[in-house]
Each structure stands twice: as C-alpha cells, then as structure tokens.
Image (cartoon, helix red, strand yellow):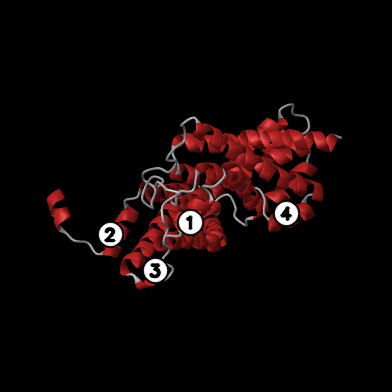
C-alpha cells in the first residue's frame, strides 16, 4: 500500500486537502465540535458563530502579518529586520516594549507577526518584550478602557504593559547571555523550522520586485500558505475553546474568588484570568461589572493583564509556535508580571 501511495502523484490542491484532513489539530477540532453538538445541541451553532466572528475580526491583522512574513522572505528584507533588532540589546528591548504598547495587535493577532520576526532571525529578547507588551494595550484600547473603567486604570495598564515587556525582554537577554533559549522556534513550525542564523556583518541585498523572479514568487506564496495554515488552524481551535469558556464559566464564580473579601485576590485573579479572559475589548465591560460587584482594583488589573498575555487562545498559539522552555517563560512572565502590576496598582489606589 505504501508503494502504491507513493506512486500516485497528487495535485497540489489534493495534497493540501490531504494535509488538512489528516492534521491532528483539525481532527481534534472536528471531534470537539461533534461532541459539543451531541452534548449541547443549542450551543454548537453559537460556538461556530463565535469562532467565525472572532476569525473575521482578527482577519485583517492575520493576513497583514502573514503577508508581511511572505514579503520579507521573498524580498530578503527579513535580514534587514534582523539587523535592526540585532543592535544594542537594551535599546532594542526598550523600543520593542514601547512599540508593543502602541501596536494594534491583540494576544492572538500578534502571533503571526511574532512567528515572522523569529523566523527572520530577530533575537528572542526584543521579540518577547513585544509579545508581552503588545496584547495588553494599544491606543484604541486605551480610549475604551478610560471611558469604560477609568482614566487612572487605563494609564496604569499602559505602564504595566511597558513594564512587563521590559522585564520579559531583559530577563530573556540575561538567560541568553548564559547560553540558554537559543533557537526558540519549534522544528515543526510551518515556515520551515528553527530560527535561521543571522550574520550582522554579511552583505544584504533586497529584491523589492520579487514578483519578477519565479523562484521568489514561489517563496512568497509558500510562506503565506505555510504560515497561514499553521497559525490559522491553531487560532480557529483557540477561539472555539474560548467560546466554550465564555459560555460555561460564570462571572459570579470569579467574583467569589477575587472579591475584596479574599486574601489572595490578586494571585487568584492572575490565574483565573487565563481561562476566563475573552479579548481585550470584551474584557473591559466585564472588568467594570466585576469591580462593581466587589473585585478589588489590584485584582482587576491582575486579571486583565494576565488574561491579555496568557489567555488560553493565545497560549495555545504560542505553544504551537515555540519550544517548551520559551513557552514556559511566556506563561510565567504573564502570571508574575500581572501579579506585580496588580499589587502596585492596589497600593496606588489605596494611597
């Protein structure tokens, strides 16, 4: 049978379809949806609609990011990107933290861009700084947070985003100085595997008119397909899980754990924020309501920053992309950074 299968030359669409139906993530998604349809028939179409709407909402950023990855690879501009972020480490980490707080990417929307940066040879330290700070705050979210919760909360959240990004970036830089965390990408990642090596002194040529070269056109198309398929399937699966969590985790349960009567409100808020967090914009009215119900200001800050960085949808996407030590650090930065932000904000709120 194997010899017979190898002798059949499948067309490109047929190969892609075969790759889809035999993919473990796709199979798991189909089984999970089928199980939901059996156990809760009314919820199944709602979860499907939730997933489609979430993917539609993130689509502009998703396609922009994977197109950027394809363009950078096809033109050779990825080497220039790596060179920019391979300068003075402290400066690139600071710049990445600030850029992350100003970028319009959510926790899942930033993943394709992170994949492109790592695959281009950008050092992990500024990438981690950007990855941590970006989903916590952006200009539009600042305005909505200020109007939906308070201006003080929005300003504190911005400071927390930059501070958590700086802490993550410099921590990774220190670990790499002692020989850890090299080649952060998994070998199975769609764009070809581990982080490519980068020579800062090598001559760099950029072929802007890449479409005139058949080989570079193929690189562009292949990069978009590989990144789009790899990251897209994980995002669909992540949003489907998010729909389940939003439906079956009641807000009252959260309040009982992170209200003003709890001595461990802030640490618990960081942990609860991972499964209960929906998205940056939906979390704002949720947090406002929970604060009205008794959630402390520090717990609210801890919840919203932890959830933004390491919510289950985002965590699944990051887990699929990077090696386990990098993923573990990503989760720890989200948890402990959010706890620190919560305690600091609680102290300022009391004073």
Does 107 sit left or right of 156 as displayed?
left
Task: Please name the residue that numbered disc 2 is placed on.
Answer: 15
Task: Please name the residue that numbered disc 4 is placed on.
Answer: 142
x then y, percent, for residue 110: 55, 52
Does 160 sit left or right of 214 as displayed?
right
Q: Which mark is residue 80?
A: 1
Secondary structure beneath label 2:
helix
Marks 1 and 2: which is nearer the front?
1
Q: Which of marks 3 and 4 is nearer the N terminus?
A: 4
Above or below residue 138? Residue 305 is above
Does 22 sit left or right of 251 as displayed?
left
x then y, percent, for residue 77: 45, 60
Q: Distance between the residues labelled 1 and 3?
A: 16 Å
Q: How far apart are marks 3 and 4 (CA)?
A: 39 Å
Q: Residue at x 58, y 49 (%)?
A: 107
Quadrant of the snapshot with the C terminus: top right
Secondary structure beneath label 3:
helix
Marks 4 and 1: which is nearer the front?
1
Residue 98 visible to an observer of this rendering: yes
Q: Which residue is drawn at 72% across and 31% down?
A: 265
């Amino acid at each position: 049978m194997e010899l017979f299968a190898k002798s059949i030359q499948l067309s490109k669409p047929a190969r892609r379809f075969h790759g889809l139906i035999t993919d473990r993530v796709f199979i798991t998604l189909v089984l999970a949806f089928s199980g939901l349809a059996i156990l809760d028939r009314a919820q199944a179409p709602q979860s499907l609609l939730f997933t489609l709407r979430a993917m539609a909402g993130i689509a502009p950023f998703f396609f922009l990011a994977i197109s950027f990855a394809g363009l950078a690879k096809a033109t050779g501009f990825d080497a220039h990107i790596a060179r920019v972020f391979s300068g003075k480490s402290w400066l690139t980490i600071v710049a990445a933290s600030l850029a992350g707080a100003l970028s319009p990417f959510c926790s899942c929307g930033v993943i394709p861009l992170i994949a492109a940066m790592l695959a281009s040879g950008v050092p992990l330290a500024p990438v981690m700084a950007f990855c941590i700070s970006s989903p916590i705050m952006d200009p539009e979210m600042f305005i909505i947070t200020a109007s939906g919760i308070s201006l003080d909360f929005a300003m504190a959240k911005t400071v927390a985003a930059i501070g958590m990004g700086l802490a993550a970036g410099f921590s990774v830089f220190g670990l790499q100085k002692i020989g850890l965390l090299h080649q952060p990408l998994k070998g199975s990642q769609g764009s070809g595997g581990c982080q490519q090596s980068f020579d800062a002194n090598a001559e760099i040529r950029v072929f802007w008119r890449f479409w005139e070269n058949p080989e570079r056109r193929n690189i562009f198309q292949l990069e978009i397909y590989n990144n789009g398929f790899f990251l897209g399937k994980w995002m669909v699966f992540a949003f489907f899980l998010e729909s389940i969590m939003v439906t079956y985790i009641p807000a009252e349960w959260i309040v009982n754990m992170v209200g003003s009567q709890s001595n461990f409100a802030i640490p618990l808020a960081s942990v609860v924020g991972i499964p209960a967090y929906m998205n940056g914009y939906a979390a704002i009215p949720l947090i406002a309501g929970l604060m009205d119900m008794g959630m402390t200001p520090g717990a609210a800050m801890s919840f919203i920053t932890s959830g933004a960085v390491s919510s289950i949808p985002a965590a699944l996407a990051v887990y699929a992309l990077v090696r386990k030590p990098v993923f573990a650090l990503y989760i720890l930065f989200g948890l402990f950074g959010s706890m620190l932000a919560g305690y600091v904000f609680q102290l300022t709120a009391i004073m």
